[in-house]
Amino acid sequence: MPAFEAVHLQHARKSLVEKSIASIKFVVEQAEKYQVIKLPPPAAGGVFTIPKGLPQDVERAILKSTFEGDTMSRIIGILKRYCDARKKGFRWE
C-alpha cells in the first residue's frame, strides 16, 4: 500500500472511530484539494407557499416580486415588514 493511501486511511479511521477533529479537518481538506467532493447544484424550482390570512396588498406584493424574478430575500423582507407592523399593533386591512 502506498504511503499516500496509508496516511489517508489512517486519518479516515481516526475521523470515524476516534472523532479526531484534526483528522476530520485533514480528510475534508484533502477531499477539497483533489476535488472528491463538490457543492450540490442550486435549487431550481419548487413550491412557494404564501401564509394564509395575509392582506391582499401584501399577497400582491409577494406575487409581483416572484414573477419579476426577485430573490427570496425581497419576499422575506415584505413578510417581515408585515409582521413587524402587526406586532406594533397596526391593523393591515
Image: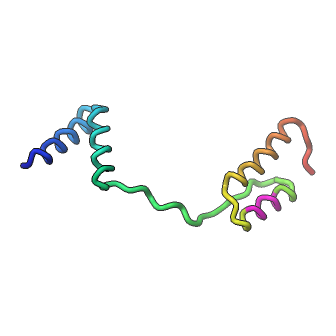
Relative to 65, does residue 79 appear above or below in the rendering? above
88, 3: nearer the viewer: 3
Q: Which residue in the rendered view is the most extreme toward the front?
A: 33
Relative to 25, does residue 58 appear above or below in the rendering? below
Most frequent secondary structure within the magenta stretch: helix
55, 9: nearer the viewer: 9
2, 82: nearer the viewer: 2
Say whether residue 28 is magenta. no
Q: Residue at x 86, y 59 (%)?
A: 56
Q: Which residue in the rendered view is the most extreme toward the left?
A: 1
* Residue 26 left/right relative to 59: left
Relative to 72, does residue 67 appear above or below in the rendering? below
x, y percent for residue 17 = 23, 35
Q: Residue at x 27, y 32 (%)?
A: 20
Relative to 86, does residue 57 appear above or below in the rendering? below
x, y percent for residue 25 = 31, 38
- Coloring basis for residues: rainbow
* Residue 81 left/right relative to 25: right
Q: Which residues are magenta?
A: 59-65
Q: Residue at x 14, y 48 (%)?
A: 5
Q: Residue at x 72, y 53 (%)?
A: 74
x, y percent for residue 31 = 29, 49
x, y percent for residue 67 = 73, 67
The total of numbered circles placed on residues is: 0
